[in-house]
Amino acid sequence: MDAAVLLIALQTVLAATWRMATPLIYTAIGEMFAERAGVLNIGLEGIMLAGALTAFTGVLFTGSLAMGLLATVAIGTVCGLVFALFTVTIKANQIVVGAAFNLIGLGLTGFFYRGLFVGTPQGVETFAPLTIPLLSDLPFLGEVLFRHNLMVYGTLVLVPLATFVLYKTAFGLSLRSVGEHPKAADTVGINVSRTRYAAVIIGAVLAATGGAFLTIAQTNQFVEGITSGRGFIALAIVVFGRWSPWGILGSSLLFGAFFALQLRLQAIPDLQIPYQSLQVLPYLATIIVLISVSKRSEMPAALGVPYRK
């Protein structure tokens, strides 16, 4: 394999890395807000599936990508409200509620998809790549950085915005206080329940948006289980990124590179490796990451602990 072919292969993998990382970035940033407030939501997989099907259905019936995203925000808000109701108000076990969300999300999306769409396969309009004038024509970097769709570019806004909200606003200070010491936060007048509700809803909306990316930006179809474990990978990314927006961005790109690499390797005809072995790369990386950081992670002190006055 000559240098030119290797360069093209590297360019393809790097360009795909950002696209593959995009749903992880949206979902992990959302989960960061929830965990910073002390709420552990392991139901991301179910919420992503709900967002994926809702976006697909919205675009299919309205023909509008904006309406598809609006419907996604709506279903994410509903999921966040229900999750917060059980975990913040009723104070149910957060792990159990999250597991239920995953099971219900998988079951309901499969049920509605089979009832509405199976037998009549249809594609929907998707976000088209936006080529940045002049920059998209740059050798190598043009393909890698400047020929992506609007939802991919949206991560460039999301990460700095999340950083600003978390560290430079009163809401961010309240959020971090509630996640570290809710009793002290309550003592100084911060409404713990309201703050946790807001954080959980933000997390669910962003997770649903990550799911929507899979159906209206990466593909034009919904299939059962389309998230393929990305919700669980996002949980690992939050830990690996140390609950920091920029750390999460870097971690997401790393996992995106594993997704892109395994797809590229599968396309090599002479590679005598079973494709199943290549598909397991991102999930194997998740296990390794969790093992490596489990003993040195500094999670919010009140994470997973319901607050009782």
Image (tube, rainbow, N blue to C red):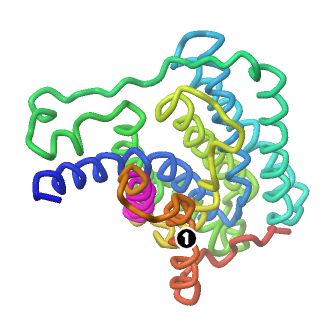
Q: Give the main secondary structure, helix, strand or loop, of the magenta stretch.
A: helix
Residue 246 versus residue 105 in the image, above or below: below
Q: Which residue position is annotated with label 1?
A: 286
Q: Is residue 255 magenta?
A: yes
**Residue 56 lies in what quarter of the image?**
top right
Question: What residue lies at 61% left-to-right and 74% top-to-bottom?
Answer: 300
- The span shown in magenta is 249-264
Residue type at numbered disc 1:
Thr
Give the structural element (helix, strand or loop) at label 1.
helix
Q: Is residue 174 visible?
A: no
In the rendered image, the residue lying farthest to the bottom is 295
Q: Is residue 153 visible?
A: yes
Question: What residue lies at 29% left-to-right and 46% top-to-bottom?
Answer: 15
Quarter containing the C terminus:
bottom right
Q: How many marks?
A: 1
Question: What residue lies at 31% left-to-right and 52% top-to-bottom?
Answer: 13
Foreground of the two, 91 or 41: 41
**Residue 295 lies in what quarter of the image?**
bottom right
Left or right: residue 41 compared with residue 211: right
